[in-house]
Amino acid sequence: MSATPRTPSIASQVSRRRFLRDLGIATGCVATGATLLGCEVSEVKVSGGGDVTELAFNVTDAKFVDLKAVGKMVAVNVGGAKLLLIRTTQAEVIALSRICPHAACDLSPDGVGTWKVASSTLHCGCHNSEFKPDGKYVADSVNGGGKVGDLDSYPVTFDAAAGTGIVDLVGAV
């Protein structure tokens, strides 16, 4: 009696896909010395087409522990997006593109970005541009106040009591 080949269930295929993707990311991180910004990946939700649609985070995870404090930022690479998560208040975390549209400077904490708590703006050290929490460009001193461009903003659902949140990677504005 011959055995009929068994087709893996959809759940095991997704798990295998996630495992292989995460293994590839981890291997890339190790190969590059694991010092690259946003090298760690947290829990992600993948669509049926294999696209990453959400990033779940917890401020107790090593990668996101800085988000316990207001004014702190964390750089994340996920689903092809280079994001900056910022704890703007006790009750809010925002997610913005972390690449400045002026000169492609990295706004991560290890790059040229600074969150200014007093003015609630993201400051780019490359050319002194300022961006609002919704990613809208405010002003800069180098370009004479000329329009530089806005940062993409991603919707975030954040439960401050639990310290957990979800970034919607599909709903960028």
Image (cartoon, rainbow, N blue to C red):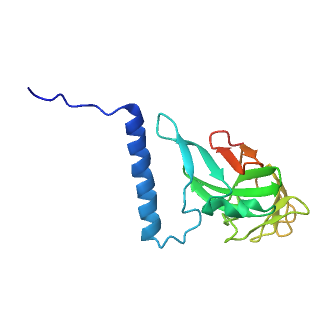
Most foreground residue, 111 or 91:
91
Instruction: Give residue 116's position: percent from left, percent from top.
Output: 85, 65
Residue at the (77%, 48%) spot, across then down: 161
Residue 143's place in the image compared with 56, above or below, is below
Residue 69's place in the image compared with 110, above or below, is above
Q: Is residue 102 visible?
A: no
Q: Quadrant of residue 132?
A: bottom right
Most foreground residue, 37 or 157:
157
* Residue 13 shown left or right of residue 130 in the figure: left
Residue 3's place in the image compared with 129, above or below, is above
Figure label count: 0
Residue at the (72%, 71%) spot, across then down: 112
Instruction: Give residue 23's position: percent from left, percent from top.
Output: 41, 56
Residue 17's place in the image compared with 105, above or below, is above
Instruction: Give residue 54's position: percent from left, percent from top.
Output: 60, 43
* Residue 139 shown left or right of residue 165 in the figure: right
* Residue 163 shown left or right of residue 119 in the figure: left
Q: Quadrant of the N terminus?
A: top left
Residue at the (47%, 73%) spot, across then down: 33
Pick out the residue farthest to the left.
1
Pick out the residue farthest to the right.
118
Q: Quadrant of the C terminus?
A: top right
Q: Is residue 55 visible?
A: yes
Q: Quadrant of residue 144?
A: bottom right
Q: Quadrant of residue 16?
A: top left
Pick out the residue farthest to the front.
161
Instruction: Give residue 74's position: percent from left, percent from top.
Output: 68, 62
* Residue 121 shown left or right of residue 112 in the figure: right
Residue at the (10%, 28%) spot, across then down: 2
Pick out the residue farthest to the top.
1
